[in-house]
């Protein structure tokens, strides 16, 4: 009687694998965009996008001018 209620072992492992895959898939689809949103929001609040761009432009200008002292204003 109890044997009829227990599915075969192959179906049980397949069910667990599919369930685990489903849980992982849902977690990634929900959490990954949340982490990206929070990361972008934090960088925008700290205004790092602009400073990164400005530092790259300053570095390129110093290289083009032949100036070896890169970022003297930031060291002071």
Image (tube, grey):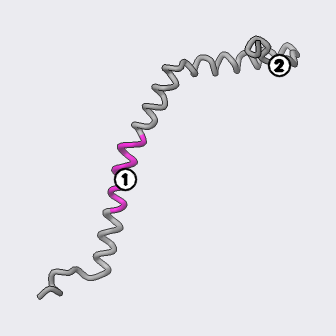
* 45 to the left or right of 34: right
- Dot 2 alpha-carbon crowd within 10 angstroms: few under 14, some 14 to 19, many 20 or more: few
Q: Residue at left 53%, top 20%?
A: 46
- Badge 1 marks a residue whose secondary structure is helix
* 67 to the left or right of 31: right
For mark 2, what is the residue?
A: 63
* 31 to the left or right of 50: left
Residue 12 is one of the magenta-drawn residues: no
Asked if disc 1 and disc 2 are in contact, CB closer than 8 Å, the reply is: no
- Tag 2 or tag 1, which sits nearer the N-term? 1
Q: Is residue 3 above or below residue 17?
A: below
Q: Residue at left 58%, top 21%?
A: 48
As drawn, which residue projects farthest toward the left? Answer: 1
Residue 28 is one of the magenta-drawn residues: yes
Instruction: Specify start and end residues of the magenta stretch as a single range.
Output: 20-32
**Percent position (x, y) of residue 3?**
17, 87
**Percent position (x, y) of residue 6?**
20, 81
- Dot 1 alpha-carbon crowd within 10 angstroms: few under 14, some 14 to 19, many 20 or more: few
């Amino acid at each position: 009687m109890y044997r009829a209620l227990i599915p075969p072992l192959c179906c049980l492992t397949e069910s667990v694998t599919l369930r685990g895959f489903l849980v992982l898939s849902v977690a990634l689809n929900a959490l990954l965009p949340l982490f990206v949103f929070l990361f972008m929001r934090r960088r925008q609040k700290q205004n790092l996008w602009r400073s990164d761009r400005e530092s790259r432009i300053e570095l390129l200008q110093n290289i083009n001018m032949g100036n070896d002292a890169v970022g003297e204003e930031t060291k002071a």
